[in-house]
Image (cartoon, coloured by chain):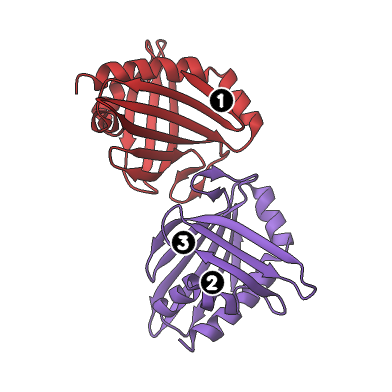
Chain colours: A red, B purple
Amino acid sequence: MTDTNGRDLVLTRIIAASPAALYRAWTEPDLLKQWFAPKPFTVSEVETDLRPGGATRIVMRGPDGTEFPSAGIYLELIENARIVFTDAYVRAWEPSAKPFFTGIITFEPEGEATRYTARVRHWSEEDRAAHEAMGFHDGWGRCADQLAALAATL
Amino acid sequence: MTDTNGRDLVLTRIIAASPAALYRAWTEPDLLKQWFAPKPFTVSEVETDLRPGGATRIVMRGPDGTEFPSAGIYLELIENARIVFTDAYVRAWEPSAKPFFTGIITFEPEGEATRYTARVRHWSEEDRAAHEAMGFHDGWGRCADQLAALAATL
């Protein structure tokens, strides 16, 4: 299930795993590597410095070896409940070349499962549209499938 | 003493007051009102929600009654040492219409005095130049004089 409005892109799923399992999959590098890139892409490097201002850096690698680094910082971390990060800074507090998005990931208990919401906010409607055209829904949706499969084993 | 480089505007002063007094003047609304606007401007409203993601909102009022609100959020607070805030968000975590600057205010003990540094980082050199043309050095310099006079009494 996906939805969009204003400057946001939103993906929501009910996942058969605990908030704690999903939080671990989002924050532990060895777990993050297993689901964060839509296959056949892989994750070759992960850094998760889990504090406000701490670096989050993930390098995805395509089947031909091309690497796609993404770097940003965490803004807020609430264990097992919420992760907020942005590419507006490359480190605390150095502005990036282009502030593009802020990701707000929430894990809400829903019975035995978890409501997983990835809300990606942009500074402009143009950037939201560009992100959608880049394949947001397909990419994040496929990764959410991989995340759900992994979290169910934790 | 002022300096600029790259995308930053920087103001540095040695102030005859403690880091704790300067931190109070930057964070307590009743004190902030006394120095933050270059006279004859005044400060009519102040909100300082002192936590990462907390709101910082200051309304300056001109001699003719015109109000100039500025709103943002704190990114980092280290008591008596450092305050970081930005206008890239209007609240946690809603992107503003235009991410313009990040302010990094530091208070470093230097003998009986304090080295006060206000570093204002922009996302582009164009924005830095625009901020300088808006009168950054004169405005922040006059406010630093007012801050120093107040902090010496705390």
Work out how far the residue at label 2 is from the one at label 1, CA to CA, in angstroms.
Answer: 45 Å
Q: Work out whether B77 lies above or below B21.
A: above
Work out how far the residue at label 3 is from the one at label 2, CA to CA, in angstroms.
Answer: 26 Å
Nearest the viewer among B79 and B10 is B79
Residue A66 appears anywhere in the view: no
As helix, strand or loop, the secondary structure at mark 1 comes to: strand
Which residue appears at 31% of the width and 27% of the height?
A: A114
> Position of A128 compared to A35: left or right?
right
Residue A118 appears anywhere in the view: yes
Other residues around mark 1 within 10 Å, as few (<14) / some (14–19) / many (≥20): some
Residue at image mark 1: A4
Q: Work out whether A141 lies above or below B90.
A: above
Q: Are marks 1 and 3 in contact (CB under 8 Å)?
A: no
Residue at image mark 3: B49
Q: Are marks 3 and 2 in contact (CB under 8 Å)?
A: no
Which residue appears at 49% of the width and 87% of the height?
A: B152
Splitting the image into 4 quarters, where does residue B52 fall? bottom left
Residue sitting at the far right: B64
To the question of a shared chain for discs 2 and 1, the answer is no
Which residue appears at 40% of the width and 48% of the height?
A: A53
**Label 2 marks which chain's residue?**
B
